[in-house]
Amino acid sequence: MRVRGKISGTAERPRLSVYRSNKNIYAQLIDDVKGVTLASASTLDSEVSGNTKTEQAAGVGALIAKRGVEKNISSVVFDRGGYLYHGRVQALAEAARENGLQF
């Protein structure tokens, strides 16, 4: 399913894009006007820890929020990438909200 045609991010309100593989989860803050990634985080980062994949996804959400706030980004457009808002995607989104991102 193509979502990107409907959701677009700007420098003031970038797109929080989520990609979920079987082992890892990745999040990026993207300015679609310039075509630039402003910040990224994934379970491959050493700062992310957790026993389950859902706990790791929450860690990625907290980390992407921290990196966004460091770059003065507080408001984003959430792009779940066609994945259901459930499980790991939901855990990432809720952790990002708790750590300062608004969407």
Image (cartoon, helix red, strand yellow):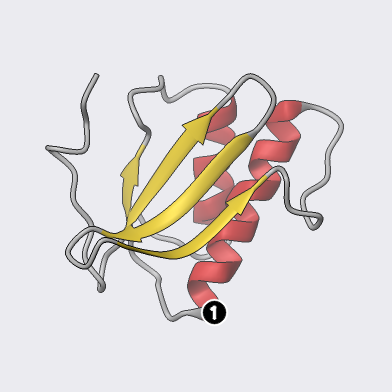
Horizontal relation, residue 71 to residue 33: left or right:
right
- Residue extending farthest left: 6
Residue closer to the observer: 33 or 65: 33
Where residue 74 appears, as percent x and y from the top left, is 40, 70
The residue at which mark 1 appears reads as: 70
Q: Type of residue at label 1?
A: Glu
Horizontal relation, residue 57 to residue 48: left or right:
left
Characterize the local packing of mark 1: few (<14), some (14-19) or many (20 or more) Cα atoms within 10 angstroms: few
- Residue extending farthest front: 35
Horizontal relation, residue 45 to residue 12: left or right:
right
Depicted 87 relative to depicted 44: above or below: above
Depicted 86 relative to depicted 17: above or below: above
Please name the residue shown 83% across and 45% down the image.
49
Please name the residue shown 69% across and 29% down the image.
54
Depicted 80 relative to depicted 63: above or below: above
Where residue 86 appears, as percent x and y from the top left, is 50, 22
Q: Quadrant of residue 30?
A: bottom left
Depicted 34 relative to depicted 56: above or below: below
Please name the residue shown 54% across and 62% down the image.
65
Where residue 99 appears, as percent x and y from the top left, is 58, 61
Q: Quadrant of the N terminus?
A: top left
- Residue extending farthest right: 51
- Kindly state the secondary structure of the residue where label 1 is placed: helix
Q: Quadrant of residue 80?
A: top left
Q: How many marks?
A: 1
Please name the residue shown 34% across and 45% down the image.
78
Where residue 51 appears, as percent x and y from the top left, is 87, 31
